[in-house]
Amino acid sequence: MVEQKRFALFLATCDSTLVKKTYGGYFNVFVSTFGEEGEQWDLFRVINGEFPEEKDLEKYDGFVISGSLHDAFGDDDWIIKLCSICQNLDDMKKKVLGICFGHQILSRIKGGKIGRASRGADMGLRSITIAKDSVKPGGYFGDKTPNSLAIIKCHQDEVWELPESATLLAYSDKCNVEMASFGDHFLSIQGHPEYNKEILFEIIDRVVSMKLMEQDLADKAKATMEEAEPDRKQWQTLCKNFLKGRTDQV
């Protein structure tokens, strides 16, 4: 009998009204994107101080860290605790997929530099360039590595500088570090493979209502998705291959 794979989501954001009503919460969005039949997924709302016990970390095959409205360079108690847990997972060589805020957290604990996005906040659909020289054939991308991939972006912070131990896997004209790996066990992505148009537009409207974004920038962000879509299937394949250990390296 094959042993059931077990994964944990470290949710660093609160469920919006739309996400709760339409999907039953972000947990379901992540599991439907990265999960597969027969797996067990557990939810830890780290933003509320919910974490697994240290002794239970070994039980998991992989972890996903979500995005957040909070700064990954912040010193809130739960962020410091998350960093500590991730350092333990690094020592254990556990698979961790960091998305947006999670991408920045992984770089932070490995000694990289993070902060406010130097070219301003990035919202909407963006094509990112794959650093093909750094990607192994037959890695997480599969047999053929694309030149670029479209992904939904939604961030005001970024990784300024990767630590020496990291490998840059993708970049764009808006952000120098769009994706990176740290050995075979950490993979981080600045964009949101799990987002769709509906989720993005709701976030944009919410950010505008909070006076955190001007309406003209919001309209431009929405316009990026009028005639294009993210490469969601390819992102799913890449992330699943990484989390399930289907290849050794990107």
Image: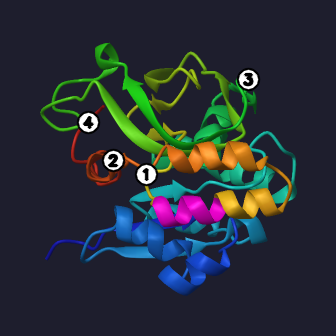
Question: Does residue 89 show up?
Answer: no
Q: SS for tag 2?
A: helix
Name the amino acid, label 2: Trp
Residue 249 in the image: x percent, y percent?
A: 29, 32
Image: 184 above or below 8:
above
Which residue is disc 4 drawn over?
Answer: 248
- Between 249 and 99, the residue placed more toward the observer is 99
Name the quadrant containing residue 131: top left
Which badge, 3 or 2, is on the more N-terminal residue? 3
Q: Secondary structure at mark 4?
A: loop
Mark 4 and mark 3 lie on one chain; the one further toward the N terminus is 3
Q: Which mark is residue 115?
A: none
CA separation in Å, label 1 and label 3: 23 Å
Camera-side residue of 144 and 53: 144
- Asked if residue 185 is positioned above or below residue 180 in the image, the reply reads below
Image quarter hosting the N terminus = bottom left
Residue where numbered disc 2 is placed: 235
Verify CB contact (< 8 Å) between mark 2 and mark 1. Answer: yes
Sequence-earlier tag: 1 or 3: 3
Within 10 Å of the Cα at label 2, are there few (<14), some (14-19), or many (20+) other Cα atoms?
A: many
Residue 109 is covered by the magenta coloring:
no
Return the residue nearer the eye: 74 or 85: 74
In space, the residues marked 4 and 1 are separated at their CA atoms by 21 Å
Magenta residue span: 197-203
Considering the image in quadrants, where does the C terminus appear?
top left
Q: Which mark is residue 193?
A: 1
Mark 1 surroundings: few (<14), some (14-19) or many (≥20) residues within 10 A: many
Look at mark 3 in the image and give the residue it sits on.
Answer: 118
